[in-house]
Amino acid sequence: QAQLVESGGGLVPAGGSLRLSCVASGSPFTLRLTDWYRQAPGKQREWVAGISSGGSTIYARSVEGRFSISRDNANNTIYLQMNSLKVEDTAVYYCHQPPANWGQGTQVTVSS
């Protein structure tokens, strides 16, 4: 399995934007189905978005219309563009390839 490394998290005001990246450090992975998950303190880990090997995308209801998942195969990178951020988007965000390949997470904090 590829080693997945997320980056791009940070502190942003409500209404702002961030773009998260997930890069494979060991082998190509962007042709495989890849998901973004997030987990806030005290809450269950939540599936956020996914992109299939064929390029189809799907989103959780809580983020649809605001977030966009995409990929750059040449750079072995999956992106999560997050717009119109809300305080409730605050979480550690993880990229994932089924069944059990996870990145280390990147913290996103949205301030009110």
Image: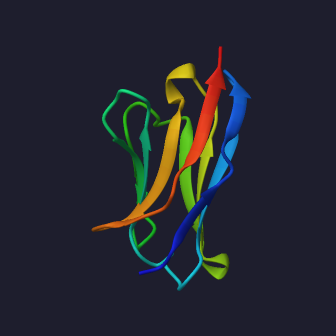
Q: Residue at x 41, y 30 (%)?
A: 62
* Rendered location of residue 89, percent (x, y): 52, 29
- Is 20 situated left or right of 49 in this image? right
The extreme left residue here reads 99
Camera sees residue 17: no
* Rendered location of residue 55, percent (x, y): 46, 68
From what the image shows, is residue 58 above or below residue 71? above
- Is 63 situated left or right of 106 in this image? left
Camera sees residue 88: yes
Q: Nearer the viewer, residue 26 or 98?
A: 26
| Quadrant where the N terminus is found in the figure | bottom left
* Rendered location of residue 20, percent (x, y): 63, 51
Q: Quadrant of residue 46?
A: top left
Q: Residue at x 48, y 52 (%)?
A: 94
Q: Quadrant of residue 43?
A: top left
Q: Residue at x 31, y 67 (%)?
A: 100
The extreme top residue here reads 112
Q: Residue at x 27, y 68 (%)?
A: 99
Count of numbered tags: 0
* Rendered location of residue 27, percent (x, y): 53, 86
The extreme bottom residue here reads 27
From what the image shows, is residue 33 above or below residue 84? below
Q: How is the image coloured?
A: rainbow
| Quadrant where the C terminus is found in the figure | top right
From what the image shows, is residue 40 above or below residue 99? above
